[in-house]
């Protein structure tokens, strides 16, 4: 099973995520050419992203001759398939493990003030993850997309988040979970080097409780 944060970083790029989704839905190993055709990108770019997914532990690669190619004629093409059971992904994406880790660490860190400790740890986790994604060249939208927030900019220079990765928990414990989400996203923006952007609480039915204001 790949490390979760390495996997998040690898899937933050939209092209890489599309390639991963294509490979994991096939019942056969996928060549670079097939992956490129399926996702509408060049073979060279597909090869680059597929190999990054292998490095992240999400895919594995090998060389396999096509069934209709006589053995020994030409070089066998590189093919890709899911590594193990792959990364657990639900549609829409949920990330309850992240909240569980933050809350557990908060109770251990400061049991008498676990709520304040949880907000502090959520911000730290966001900054750490954002810094790692920034090193991989992710911008704000690709980072949010990779984390499952389904970001969509509007004409007012806002980014509306159409999915809450913590939906069930936020429904039951709204103030706590939305506060942690706000702290996490504030830290994420800082880690990405987008401190001029503002994460603010703006609850909407069926969507994330946070929206972003981008600098003009």
Image (cartoon, rainbow, N blue to C red):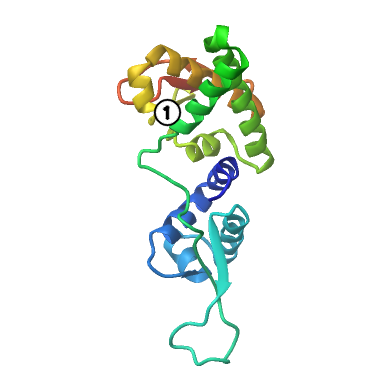
Nearest the camera: 27 or 42?
27
Q: Nearer the viewer, residue 134 or 63?
A: 63
The answer to which quarter of the image holds residue 43 is: bottom right
| Quadrant into which the C terminus falls | top right
Q: Is residue 3 above or below residue 61?
A: above
Q: Is residue 164 above or below residue 38?
A: above
The image quadrant that residue 47 belongs to is: bottom right
Report the side of 26 relative to 186 (left or right).
Answer: left
Q: Secondary structure at mark 1?
A: strand
What percent of the width, then of the height, locates residue 53? 57, 55
- 178, 162: nearer the viewer: 178
Look at the image and tell me whether residue 4 can be seen.
Answer: yes
How far across and down, in percent of the image, does residue 5 sit?
A: 58, 40
Kindly identify the residue that appears in the image at 38 percent across and 59 percent down.
Answer: 25
Q: Is residue 193 left or right of residue 94?
A: right
Q: Relative to residue 94, is residue 209 depicted above or below?
A: above
Q: Residue at x 58, y 22 (%)?
A: 105
x%, y% of residue 207?
Answer: 35, 26
In the picture, residue 49 is in which quadrant? bottom right
Q: Position of residue 148 (x, y in %)?
A: 45, 36
Kindly identify the residue that appears in the image at 60 percent across and 27 percent down. Answer: 125
Does residue 186 show up? Answer: no
Numbered marks: total: 1
Residue at which label 1 appears: 161
Question: What crowding class fits label 1: few (fewer than 14 Cα within 10 Å), some (14-19), or many (20 or more)?
Answer: many
User: Is residue 96 positioned above or below 74 on the image?
Assistant: above
Residue closest to the far top: 112
Q: Residue furthest left?
A: 205
């Amino acid at each position: 099973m790949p490390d979760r944060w390495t996997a998040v970083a690898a899937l933050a790029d939209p092209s890489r995520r599309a390639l991963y989704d294509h490979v994991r839905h096939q019942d056969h190993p996928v060549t670079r050419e097939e992956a490129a055709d399926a996702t509408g990108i060049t073979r060279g770019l597909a090869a680059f992203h597929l190999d990054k997914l292998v490095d992240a532990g999400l895919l594995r690669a090998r060389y396999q001759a096509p069934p209709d190619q006589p053995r020994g004629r030409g070089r066998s093409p590189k093919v890709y398939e899911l590594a193990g059971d792959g990364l657990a992904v639900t549609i829409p994406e949920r990330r309850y493990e992240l909240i569980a880790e933050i809350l557990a660490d908060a109770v251990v860190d400061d049991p008498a003030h676990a709520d304040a400790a949880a907000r502090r740890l959520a911000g730290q986790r966001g900054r750490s993850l954002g810094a790692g994604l920034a090193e991989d060249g992710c911008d704000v939208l690709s980072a949010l997309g990779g984390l499952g927030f389904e970001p969509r900019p509007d004409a007012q220079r806002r980014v509306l988040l159409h999915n809450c990765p913590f939906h069930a928990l936020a429904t039951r414990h709204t103030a706590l979970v939305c506060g942690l989400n706000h702290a996490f996203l504030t830290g994420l923006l800082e880690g990405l080097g987008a401190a001029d952007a503002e994460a603010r609480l703006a609850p909407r039915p069926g969507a994330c409780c946070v929206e972003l204001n981008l600098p003009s």
